[in-house]
Image (tube, grey):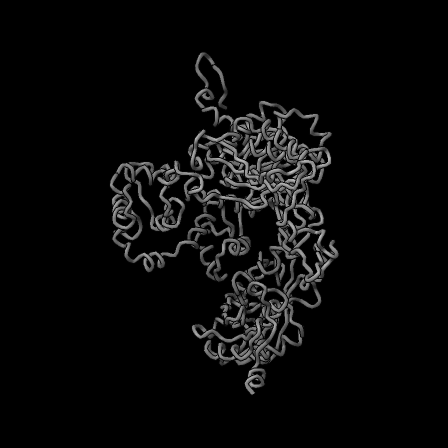
Amino acid sequence: MAMLGISNGMPSMGSFIPEVEQNICQLERGTVVTKFFPRKRPERKTLMVRRETRQIVWSRTASTRTFEGAVDLREVKEIRIGKNSKDFERWPEEAKRIENLRCFVVYYGLEFRLKSLSIAALSERECEVWIRGLRHLVPDTQNASYPLQVERWLRKEFYGMENIREMVTLKDLKAFLPRVNCKVPTSKLRELFQEVDTRKRMELGFDDFATLYHKLMFDGSAFHEIFESYRNYSENGMTVSLQEFQSFLIQEQKDPLGNDERGVSQFLRDYLQDPQRNVQEPYFTTSEFMDFLFSKQNEIWNHRFDDIYQDMTRPLGHYWISSSHNTYLTGDQFSSESSVEAYVRCLRMGCRCIELDCWDGPDGMPFIYHGHTLTTKIKFLDVIKTIKDHAFITSEYPVILSIEDNCSLPQQRKMASAMQEVFGEMLLVHPVEKNETQLPSPHQLRRKIILKHKKLPEGVDEASFMIKNDEVKEMDLRNTVKNGILFLEDPVDKEWNPHFFALTQNKLFYTDTFPESQENDGEDEEEEVGFHRPKEVRGYRIGVPNDELHFSEKWFHGKLPGGRAEAEELLHSYSYLGDGTFLVRESETFIGDYSLSFWRQGKVNHCRIRSKQDKGQTKYFMIDTNCFDSLYSLITHYRNHPLRSQEFLITLQESVPQPKKHEGMEWYHAHATRAMAEDMLRRVPSDGAFLVRPSEKDPNNSFAISFRAEKKIKHCKIKLEGRLFTMGTMQFESLVELVNYYERQPLYKKIKLWYPVSEEVVRRLGA
């Protein structure tokens, strides 16, 4: 309703809105742009900012519910005006029809090699609005206080899970928690879920979701146990007042800020960003105080040292210089891509010495690449122009160009002319002082580019001079007997993958990977960032079935190899637990359904648990009138309410324990201690020798895998969580499955479980 200008002789509301806020509001509404892609033709999209999650998002329409892709503003490293990305170069016909000043590129990511978002706006004005808005939002996002960052992140996660009613379920949360490294039993999660679900709808909105998250993350007992000595700073055990926080800063932190009460008050208000506590005496809750202790706002680094405080007037040779080797490469030295963006990244990360490997080019100007290898080539001229643009963005101290020159003298002369033309006065061509007796200082050399290059030997005939560089021999493919791409079978997934091989007189070398399309490698990843779209990792789809609530429960036995007969055998074995003893297994006959097998009056009974789709959700039921949103909910119900039929009435009681398949394996030692395991492994002097044993500290719920690696004996803990065996972030349905997996995949560095150590093996070696 706010508009710019004057209405009825009075200034409108819009005239009081700051210009930057107007820009951001326009970006939230979205603008139509042309998005350039690495692998497909440019397309029209609606580009917008989602302020509450601090993301740039795009879609075919101006929908606020679903998007095709997103970029987190906290990952943005640079915003460039113009057609400054390969995405524009790949589509020259489309790019040349668009003016340069209508285009901008967002470089983002957490890896050294950044991804790019290449955009052409409908007008120069809209492009300016995007540039101004993003240049305000990016630092504002990255410098936000910890509570604000957590809230924005929670909103992003919530929006990624929410259903059409803008709610999340218990099942959604069960899948979400492993992503935040939070392990909690399903029963405990359900208890907390019901606690915050005050309306009993079995769904949570954002506020309740955030409350549940903080309940899971903050353990009140841990606060009192770990921070026992801090009890003086919270008299009521619930909050930390302004005065208590001030005492903490003085006594524990030795922070001078503690001597300024007004300064402490302002610091608290800036940190909390809570309108209700924007008062003279703000306070922390104990959970907020605990979060603060681990937040960036409490980092050990003293920000007085953000600015250069060292003496920078000494000779240049007195300093360590941040340097980069093979600066142009984005990967390995055999076959990776060379890129000017690697120079940008290094310079903006603070490197002051960068390397240029120069080789003769066909048009009289050199290329830069790793000579006599399969690395791609970039133009010398493009590199020095890039260096000029980015050399002094991060630091004004000199940049040293370490030139490994393999060029002929005519091309070297062209290099010299090009550098003088591009760098101009930045290039150091004369001594700083006429009669200097030592190297100039970094202070004297500010904003200067220095060349590090070998001189021609005295008296050499320039016409016949040849460059000799022994340093490149090691990687020179001309010295190999044979080189090229071969396919190697992956021992795990049995797929044939390309690798670059080089055969020398003594060895056969090969790279870890060889991307089939190097220049596109990693550049199109943002296309996979969509909402309401299942993710896949190497054929493993998140959301089925191990994220289902029932998957870790002891009563769930998955797909029993022996089917119905094995279920009956198990129930007979545990019949002493009484009527109501049960297990649930996958149905042999009906895919997607389950079977409930239970013991009653000396007999095994089987009931089918059916499933159906209802408004896009899977429902589970045994009778049509009583449906449940998960298998877990169904079983929980019948453990508290009787299962009725014409012949009987029964409530499910104890579950049948999981079969202990590991007990018959040669590598399992039921009575071995840590000391005994180490003694046995010392007798098997081979990396990959291993055994599994119960943990001494918690033999009922934990195991340990003991193995040899790098001439040492190491131990890994395996926790039993429900029916699943967990090691790190990996979960397995049995110890046998775990061992089988690490027989194919490295457990530690490159060590796999190769040699099971049995008592017979130890006896044989001892003899």
Query: Residue 10 sits in which quadrant?
Result: top left
Q: Residue at x 42, y 33 (%)?
A: 443
Instruction: Please give left or right for residue 699 compared with residue 300 in the image.
Output: right
Residue drawn 70% across the image and 37% down it: 361
- Given the current orientation, which residue lies at the most extreme top position? 9
Q: How many marks?
A: 0
User: x%, y% of residue 641?
Assistant: 52, 65
Residue extending furthest toward the bottom:
767
Q: Position of residue 546 (x, y in %)?
A: 59, 60
Q: Is residue 469 left or right of residue 441?
A: right
* Quarter of image, res 340: top right
> For this rendering, which residue is in front, 272 or 309?
309
Q: Is residue 584 left or right of residue 313?
A: right
**Res 379 seen here:** yes
Rendered location of residue 381, percent (x, y): 64, 33
* Quadrant including the C terminus: bottom right
Residue 57: x percent and y percent?
58, 37
Residue lying farthest to the front in this orientation: 459
